[in-house]
């Protein structure tokens, strides 16, 4: 049988805070550098115009030759690897937060696109992919006649 106990919201919040503090301390190991992640996921914006789907991915500090863009079915795949910079031998790090390692991001494209006309440009840390819509998916203006 269950016993009823009074609810103490302040006590619950205090317990939650202690648990969160413990998790953060464990994650950062009390001031040590957090372990390097082997992969990361770039942020993307996906928008639509009358003629195309536009995908922008935030991947700063990359060499364009290290970025691979492909379309598989209705999924745009962006992948690559951000290599570590050469470390100085006399340099002691206190914190390492810059993203490094391999990444992959898959974005579903909601309409059919013309695969032969896809364009990808990389500028100022932003990859811009333009996927032109096929003719049958572009909106068609229909004239309304007066009878």
Image (tube, rainbow, N blue to C red):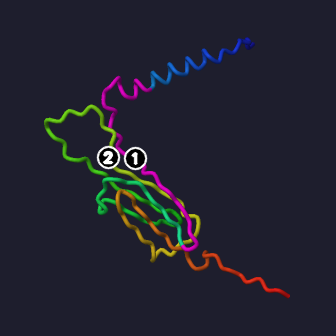
Quarter that holds the N terminus: top right
At x 32%, y 47%, the residue is: 101
Start-end of magenta stretch: 24-51
Is residue 49 positioned above or below 35 on the image?
below
Tell which circle, 1 or 2, labels the residue nearer the N-terminal end: 1
139 sits left or right of 56 in the view: right
How much space separates mark 1 and mark 2, taking CA atoms?
8 Å
Q: Residue furthest front?
A: 146
Q: Residue furthest bottom?
A: 147
Picture coordinates of residue 47, whole percent (x, y): 54, 62
Query: Magenta stretch: residue 46 in it?
Result: yes
At x 48%, y 62%, the residue is: 55
Please state the total of marks drawn on the protein image.
2
Tell me if mark 1 has few (under 14), some (14-19) or many (20+) residues whose alpha carbon lies within 10 angstroms of its own.
some
Q: Secondary structure at mark 2?
A: loop
Q: Secondary structure at mark 1?
A: strand
Q: Check whether the beta carbons of the residues at disc 1 and disc 2 lie within 8 A of each other.
A: yes
Q: Read off the residue under disc 1.
A: 40
Picture coordinates of residue 142, whole percent (x, y): 71, 81
Q: Read off the residue under disc 2.
A: 100
Is residue 129 positioned above or below 13 on the image?
below
Picture coordinates of residue 118, whole percent (x, y): 45, 72
């Amino acid at each position: 049988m269950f016993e009823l106990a009074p609810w103490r919201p302040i006590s619950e919040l205090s317990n939650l805070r202690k648990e969160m503090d413990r998790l953060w301390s464990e994650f950062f190991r009390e001031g040590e550098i957090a372990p390097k992640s082997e992969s990361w996921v770039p942020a993307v914006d996906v928008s639509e115009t009358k003629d195309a789907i536009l995908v922008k991915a935030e991947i700063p500090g990359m060499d364009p030759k290290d970025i691979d863009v492909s379309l598989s079915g209705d999924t745009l795949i962006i992948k690559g690897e951000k290599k570590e910079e050469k470390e100085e031998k006399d340099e002691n790090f206190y914190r390492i937060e810059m993203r490094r390692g391999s990444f992959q991001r898959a974005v579903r494209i909601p309409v059919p696109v013309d695969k032969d006309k896809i364009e990808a440009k990389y500028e100022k840390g932003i990859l811009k992919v333009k996927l032109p819509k096929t003719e049958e998916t572009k909106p068609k203006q229909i004239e309304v006649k007066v009878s």
